[in-house]
Image: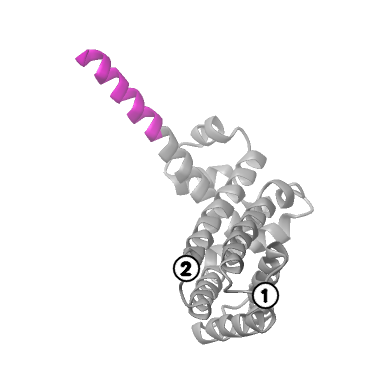
Amino acid sequence: MADVAGRTDGGGSTRRGRIDKRHAILDAAFVVFAEKGYAQACVKEIAAAAGVAKPTVYNHLSDKENLFRHAIEAASGAHLQQQLAALGRLADPEADVRTALSRVASELARSGCAERAWALRRLLYAEASRFPELLDTGAGPYADRLAEALADRLARLALAGRLRITDPTLAAEQFLALITGPLQRRSRYGTRAPSAAEQQEIADAAVDTFLAAFG
């Protein structure tokens, strides 16, 4: 039994090691692609940044195109998790709605202004013609999941009588647009970083406008 358990643990360690190595490769790939762009980035440089041999990259991701797709999807997924965590502020329908929405808007604005978030957008814009499917299979569905999660929170608040909403999905899209639209403009589409004061100004204006319509 001890021998079986030992082999099981060893197998588990091997699987964890392989997963960790894959994560390291994808993270390094995203950084290199963000700095160089798809065309100028090379797998050898990505392997060096990840601390692995070049053949190891190919063993995990097969080729450069596959590596790029998975790096974008991994970065999109990590960004989504940060944004979903912000929606936890709306979990309690008894909480002050304005305060809760303000905190959500502030956290969404802050996460949206993170350098990795801008790098992700720039990559998607730059490579959309080469990888159009990423808008449907990569970043697109993650944005949809954020809107769906927010719509669910808003629907619960509406049922509790805290908001006047008949279409939670549309309301969620509009709330997010009130944040992302001004951030895009203030950042000049990712070429400058809005200050913390600007981010808060955008978040406060988004909440004021949203509650004027649905409060």
> Is 209 positioned to the left or the right of 13 in the image?
right
In the image, is residue 45 part of the stretch drawn in magenta? no
Residue drawn at x 50%, y 72% as measured from the top left: 107
Q: From mark 1 to mark 2, how far is it between C-alphas? A: 24 Å
Q: Which residues are magenta?
A: 1-17
Residue position marked by numbered label 1 in the rendering: 184
Main SS of residues in magenta? helix
Where residue 94 appears, as percent x and y from the top left, is: 46, 71
Residue position marked by numbered label 2 in the rendering: 89
Where residue 202 appears, as percent x and y from the top left, is: 60, 83
- Circle 1 — which element? helix
Q: How many marks?
A: 2
Neighbours of disc 2 within 10 Å: few (<14), some (14-19), many (20+): some
Image mark for residue 161: none
Residue drawn at x 57%, y 84% as measured from the top left: 204
From the viewer's perspective, is residue 193 above or below residue 6? below
